[in-house]
Image (tube, helix red, strand yellow):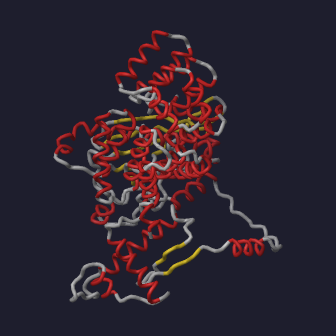
Amino acid sequence: MDRLVRRGALSPEARGHALLAHLIEHFLGAGPGVPIKAYAIAVDVLGRSTGFDPSQDSIVRVEIGRLRKLLEMYYLGPGREDPVRFDLPKGQTHLEVQFRRTELETAAEAQAESAPRPAPQSATWLRVPLLLVAVAALTLAAVVTVLMLRNPGDAEIAAALNEDYPRVFVRPFEKGPSLDKAFPGNAISSFIAIELSAFRSFRVISPLPVTTLPVRPRDYVLEGNAIASTDGAEGKVHVTLKLRDGLGTVLWSDRLSFPAKDLGTPQPVFDALSQIASMLGGALGVIDSDGRARLNDEEREWARGSTSDFRCILRWQSFDLTKDLQERMVARACLEDRAAQDTPVGQIWSALAFLRFLDWTEAGAATNDPQVEAALVAANRALLLDPNGSDGHEAMGSILTGLGRLDEAQEVLARALEINPSNLDTAVKLGWLDCLTGDWETGATRIRQVVDRYTVVPGWYRLPLALAAFRDGNASAMLEEAKAILASGDHRGLVLALVAARLGSDTTEEMRQRQALEKANLDLPEAMAEIEAIFPDVELIAALRQVP
């Protein structure tokens, strides 16, 4: 139970904590399988009066259900390797305790599994166009994430949607008369909807469950149309996409062209559509960028203390992109506020994990520092609340990278990329890991592919690129990357710019960067420690320290 608390799965002040403690005491005293009366739980644990009637008050069933779900999520995520597991059977009030198998038992089972088995019979497969098969499989897998309600009423829809989050309506794609009926317009729009649903700062609706569902000003509509043409000897299909806001203003448009023959094989189409998803849904994408711009129009509400998970996420993104100190203060206040209210939104906890991790890197503290422990707790909380979201995995991957636990970081970030292949942050972090494990060429290429697609990116994207230039002795390239890091608002570019100036014997630039360091109230050892905390390459940092 202490392990659950340390990892952020249970708050000591929560009802679930008191309930689990009571169930454990009962298990230890009465033995396995002995139920507890709902009356006893209500009165002894949940604060109900002695007149409690379980037929009139469902609090015991509700709290048992919440605890059951919490435990299930915990053991699917951060608790999957725990030596002891708690389970609450449905319809029961007693706790079941399971212990992991011993190594001897596992070895015996492995030996039994290795015994020869009859060869399986060959199967006959039904041939169906690959694009439609792949989209159908993805649609089934994502049915929980994308809002695909089955003939609901307006009241049910309103209850299912968090009204504070913007909604993205993905319309079925239209097709021109030159395209035959086989064109998979619905399949393509469904694929984009599924790709977008991996991002957590908006809600995707596809297909429209009810035609009367209103599009609000803060919502978005993605629509597309396709036409066929003949370019030379090869027929092509051209798909035009447009994203409008709720007022009808076109915020973004693009045109994709496919050889008609590619519509029978999914990969070229999927690759192009995944890039569209990242352009729309990522932190650098159109939807969140528009949402952050709208925050400037809502300062009065913010000043009155009107906070929400969605606005808090946008505030965090605003700081993460600009490193503005005022934005950091606002982001910290709202993240701590939402965490104190025990928000069930995993993205809040992952953002808080990143912020606490940043506090630790700036302090240049040891690996057992309370700040990094607090970051790990928040990241575990994010994983517990949203095991199928990439944000918590990204946060955990960053922390593990900073701690030098690169194999674990690789595993966690690979899972994040599997969950959301369109997320640019994950691709960049995997590029970092390539560099840290010695494959600088692959890592720099991965990062460069992302950086070159956007005019403005967070400064931390470029940090390995600056270090790669340092390894190559390319002072001008290092200075260029360091200045780009500084232009993003990230002061960690200061020490890199100073090193680059020294390497290039540029005394004017060196003096300028030394003055900037003093103005930022940073000394060289402190600045170096900050970089080492996020990029733990001991030999490289040692070489970096020798230059100034």
In the image, taking residue 340 as reference, residue 76 lies left or right, namely right
Please name the residue shown 31% across and 47% down the image: 312
| Residue 463 screen position, x and y as percent | 51, 31
Which quadrant would residue 161 be assigned to in this image? Answer: bottom left
Please name the residue shown 43% across and 45% down the image: 357
Nearest the camera: 372 or 109? 372
Q: Is residue 193 above or below residue 534?
A: below
Please name the residue shown 77% across and 75% down the image: 112
Which quadrant would residue 286 be assigned to in this image? Answer: top left
Q: Is residue 47 above or below residue 427?
A: below
What number of labels is visible? 0
In the image, taking residue 209 as reference, residue 413 lies left or right, namely right
Q: Can residue 301 be seen in this snapshot?
A: yes
| Residue 85 screen position, x and y as percent | 52, 73
Q: Quadrant of the N terminus?
A: bottom left
Nearest the camera: 463 or 532? 532
| Residue 448 screen position, x and y as percent | 56, 30
Q: Can residue 170 be seen in this snapshot?
A: no
| Residue 461 screen position, x and y as percent | 50, 34
Please name the residue shown 37% across and 56% down the image: 345
